């Protein structure tokens, strides 16, 4: 049970907003990096890779010289070292 001042509608809006952000991030990680297909399961490896993917996703989002999606930016950075440098500097 929660002890919040306010109405149910405000609480429901806050919960939906939180999960909307969470779902959007998960969707981006899955589309750009195939996170759901990852077979990394042992030790701290899953948490470490999730952190690295989130850092990479933020760097890709900040780089604005190419007007494509994050997955295309990731692939371009893998093929083009000059673009990779742009992403890392952004």
Image (cartoon, helix red, strand yellow):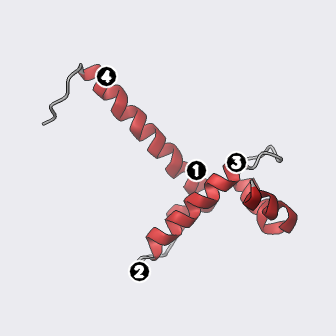
Residue extending farthest to the bottom is 42
Q: Which of marks 3 and 1 is nearer the N terminus?
A: 1
Label ID, residue 10:
4
Q: Where is residue 22 in the image (x, y as percent from the top left)?
A: 45, 45
**Residues packed near mark 2 inside 10 Å, few (<14), some (14 to 19) or many (20 plus):** few
Q: Mark 3 points at which residue?
A: 62
Label ID, residue 28:
1
Q: Mark 2 points at which residue?
A: 42
Q: Distance between the residues labelled 3 and 4?
A: 32 Å
Residue at position x 31%, y 22% from top?
10
**Residues packed near mark 3 inside 10 Å, few (<14), some (14 to 19) or many (20 plus):** few
The answer to which quarter of the image holds residue 86 is bottom right
Q: How far apart are marks 3 and 2 (CA)?
A: 31 Å
Q: Where is residue 39 in the image (x, y as percent from the top left)?
A: 49, 74
> Which quarter of the figure is the N terminus placed in?
top left
Asked if residue 59 lies left or right of residue 76, the reply is left
Q: In this view, does 11 lie above or below 62?
A: above
Q: Is mark 3 on a helix, strand or loop?
A: helix
Q: Is mark 2 on a helix, strand or loop?
A: loop
Q: Is residue 82 above or below residue 18?
A: below
The answer to which quarter of the image holds residue 56 is bottom right
Marks 3, 1: nearer the viewer: 3
Q: What element carries label 4?
A: helix
Q: What element carries label 1?
A: helix
Q: Label 2 near label 3: C-beta < 8 Å?
A: no
Q: Earlier in the sequence, mark 3 or mark 4?
A: 4
Q: How far apart are marks 3 and 1 (CA)?
A: 14 Å
């Amino acid at each position: 049970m929660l002890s919040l001042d306010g109405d149910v509608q405000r609480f429901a809006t806050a919960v939906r907003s939180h999960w909307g952000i969470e779902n959007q991030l998960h969707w981006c990680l899955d589309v750009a990096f195939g996170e759901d297909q990852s077979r990394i399961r042992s030790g701290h490896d899953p948490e470490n890779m999730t952190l690295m993917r989130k850092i990479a996703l933020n760097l890709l989002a900040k780089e604005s010289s190419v007007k494509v999606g994050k997955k295309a930016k990731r692939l371009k950075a893998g093929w083009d070292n000059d673009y990779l440098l742009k992403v890392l500097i952004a």
